[in-house]
Amino acid sequence: MSNQVISTSLFSDDDIYLFKAGKHQRAYRHFGAHLMVHENTAGCYFAVYAPSANRVEVIGNFNGWNGENFSLNVRWDSSGIWEGFIPQVCAGDIYKYKIFNNEAGEVLEKADPYARQAEHPPKTASIVSAESNYRWEDNDWMKERAKHNSIEAPLSVYEVHLASWKRKENGDVLGYRELAEELVPYVKKAGFTHVEFMPIMEYPYEPSWGYQITGYFAASSRFGNPEDLKYLVDAFHQEGIGVILDWVPSHFPADAHGLGNFDGTCVYEHPDDRKGYHPDWKSLIFNYGRPEVKSFLISNAIFWLDQFHIDALRVDAVASMLYLDYSREDGQWEPNEFGGNENLEAIAFIKEFNEAVYGSFPDVQTIAEESTSFSKVSFPTFDGGLGFGLKWMMGWMNDGLEYFKRDPIYRSHHHNEITFSLAYAFTEHFMLPLSHDEVVYGKKSLLEKMPGDSWQQFANLRLLFSWMYLHPGAKLIFMGGEFGQREEWKFAESLSWHELESKAHGGIFNTISQLNGIYRSEKSLHKDNYNYQSFRWIEHNDHHNSVLSFIRKSGDEELVCVLNLTPKPIESYLIGVPAKGNYQVVFNSDDGANWGSDFPIKKTGKTSKTASHGFDQSLELSLAPLAALVYKLTK
């Protein structure tokens, strides 16, 4: 039987040029499996990049996994692209590419790098995906999302690992559509503005939590098909909630069916292990200097924004991309051409990625998980920056958790830990993260990190969250933290939902709901979040009492915030305030509804002419134990 593959192409000369130049931003329109009708015959067009292959066959359930007569045609233009049309292949058919490399003497069976569906792990084949006929109902959100995603808007993120947020009684995970019924109303009730999914691109290994991806364009089949994921995103948007995806361009696993050694050579990974192998994660690192790899990665980022209406991409492990010596000893890395440790090719890629995203989708955000002092991470590229919209503030997280872990009796000796973040809070557009990384691998849950008896633990956690929401910057809380789960996160189990029935854990949820409410309603807490004029200390050096007092400001609106960081209530505490008049409590973390002590504070107060803290007038307050108070001037 002769070859069953019919010669045709979805590539124009311009497409080839852009792909080879690393400038193609929508390569997914051409690569992969595309159902079509060719010369009145229904079937599927396949295209794959395998520049060192001598032969590429398509094998699948439609040919008994025998590709002898199903060889793709290599393009005449030396682009390394193999393509062709196979009649009668249908949606739902499963397939791989059988790649022959005569020089290396290898025959490889690979999943499609651009496949939009994949088999449920541990199976590894790609699936021919049906053409999408999904009808979006989020027009109102899409028209207004520039306002919702702006850095002048409140950005409060609920980080979710879909496989362990909630499970069925038999232990099965909830599907995308089931999550739409349960997760969406829960996030809305808690008051978060956005939800962030830990990676939902197809991954083979459950303990990787999704961070070892083999199918970059495929929504994980664990939870349903691509249309089901669109339904979930749509459901969030219809409730006014944005959706953020974790995106992992930093590394990928070496699984036999994946991107590694794709055609018998290093197509996607850097060929030098000093740049192409990650010692921490035992995974491969993309070759950021190869144009075709840049086209693949940037097209992947655009794909999720374009096809799934995603509102932001949180980019994982940016620090590992920026530095040649990241997690490497002397002799395990080679300096760049200028003698430095910066990975110049990765830096150039990151800038191109951000320019591509914001160029096509100016109403979205990119967020860097970046833990070093690399400068201008969240500055535009034209100003010498990397081009991200936001950067995780790891220093705030580390210092804050270290402080809150301490017995309050010792906190006066470590006051600088809680105040230091304000020394650099406006050097970047920061997001304050209390993420999954802080509640796993024996680190304990947020609640269990807190010192003292049970009541003090809950009070401390309410206080930590209050500090987060009153501090400048966007917010991120990992699931379970919002109700103070006592056990640390377990990726293969559901959250401890029964705890939410108790008054103590319900009080944490109520606190989060209240904080999200004032964060959204009070411009002082979000509109000028990244401007140093939005924050002013009243007193940052009262280490004797372990009390912080400060002002949050936007235009002529101001809030006065006071945190008592010990279990000792304080009567007649005097603070200076900028404007005379009557002040009223708008938030009290010690409220009885939050399982607080309901200590009798002054819910309203009138300024006196006593000068204090550089102001002409002052307020005399009573401070509840381990509590945050927020006052607002009333007319």
Image (cartoon, grey):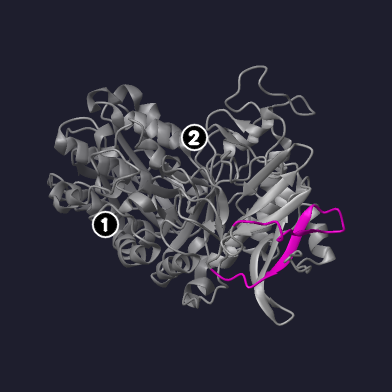
Q: Which of the 4 quarters of the picture holds residue 549?
A: top left
Left/right of residue 586 with respect to residue 329 in the rendered view: left
Q: Is 424 in front, or is 272?
A: 272
**Residue 395, relative to residue 155: is it above or below?**
above
User: What's the residue at 78%, 69% (across, down)?
Assistant: 8
Rendered-image quadrant of the N terminus: bottom right
Q: Point out residue 439 in the picture as x, y percentages from the top left corner.
A: 34, 37
**Residue 404, relative to residue 40: is it above or below?**
above
Q: Visible in this render: residue 59?
A: yes
- Mark 2: which amino acid? Ala
Instruction: Single out the residue that lies furthest toward the top.
Output: 330
**Structural crowding at the residue carrying mark 2, measured as other residues with C-alpha within 10 Å and reported as few (<14), some (14–19) or many (≥20):** few
User: What's the residue at 70%, 48% (across, down)?
Assistant: 99
Q: Which of the 4 quarters of the picture holds residue 433?
A: top left
- Mark 1: which amino acid? Lys
Q: Which residue is mark 2?
A: 423
- C-alpha gap between disc 1 and disc 2: 47 Å
Q: Earlier in the sequence, mark 1 or mark 2?
A: 1
Q: Is 248 in front, or is 168?
A: 168
Per the image, label 2 sits on a secondary structure element best described as helix
Left/right of residue 256 with respect to residue 524 in the rendered view: right
**Which portion, as a residue range, is magenta?**
65-91
Q: Point out residue 255 in the picture as x, y percentages from the top left corner.
A: 56, 41
Q: Point out residue 69 in the picture as x, y percentages from the top left corner.
A: 72, 60
Instruction: Single out the residue that lies furthest toward the bottom.
Output: 40
Instruction: Considering the whole magenta stretch, tell me its main secondary structure.
Output: loop
Left/right of residue 518 with respect to residue 331 in the rendered view: left
Rendered-image quadrant of the C terminus: bottom left
Q: Marks 1 and 2: CB-CB under 8 Å? A: no
Q: Which residue is mark 1?
A: 168
Q: Visible in this render: residue 374?
A: no
